[in-house]
Amino acid sequence: GCEVHFDDRVIDIFAQQTLSPRYATRHTIGRILLYQYQRLARSLGRTPTKRDIDHNCLLHSDFYRDVFGSWKAFEKVAASSSPTEGQQ
């Protein structure tokens, strides 16, 4: 089959438009938090901590706990959906 690879900047533009915390709903908040986390990870060049989220993101780590049940539960989701999983 055919495979298409987009530059991160293009993906960020689309994601910012569709995954903006300003437009969060109960149906999209999990994806928005995951996107925010992955974007910060790319920016930092490492896995963000709760403190990194609290210092750098509009939606703080309390939201992650509320949506996913705990920070650890969120980290499991993030690890399983990481676009760079297995490349480290």
Image (cartoon, grey):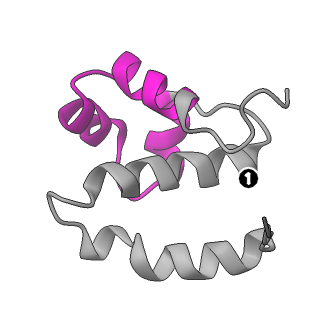
Q: Residue at x 38, y 58 (%)?
A: 32
Q: Residue at x 71, y 32 (%)?
A: 85
Report the label total: 1
Name, please, the residue furthest toward the front.
1
- The residue singled out by tag 1 in the image is 43
Would you place residue 17 above or below residue 19 in this image?
below
Range of magenta residues: 50-79
Residue 79: horizontal and vertical position, in percent? 57, 27
Q: Residue at x 60, y 34 (%)?
A: 48
Would you place residue 15 above or below residue 57 in this image?
below
Residue 82: horizontal and vertical position, in percent? 62, 38
Residue 39: horizontal and vertical position, in percent? 62, 55
- Quadrant for the N terminus, please: bottom right
31 or 56: which is nearer to us?
31
Q: Amino acid at mark 1?
A: Ser
Horizontally, residue 61 falls left or right of residue 53, namely left
- 63 in magenta: yes
Q: Residue at x 31, y 37 (%)?
A: 64
Name, please, the residue furthest toward the top.
72
Q: Give the quarter of the image for residue 24.
A: bottom left
Residue 9: horizontal and vertical position, in percent? 74, 76
Would you place residue 61 above or below residue 20 in this image?
above
Q: Residues within 10 Å of mark 1 (few under 14, many from 20)?
A: few
- 53 in magenta: yes
Q: Main secondary structure of the magenta part?
A: helix
82 or 24: which is nearer to us?
82
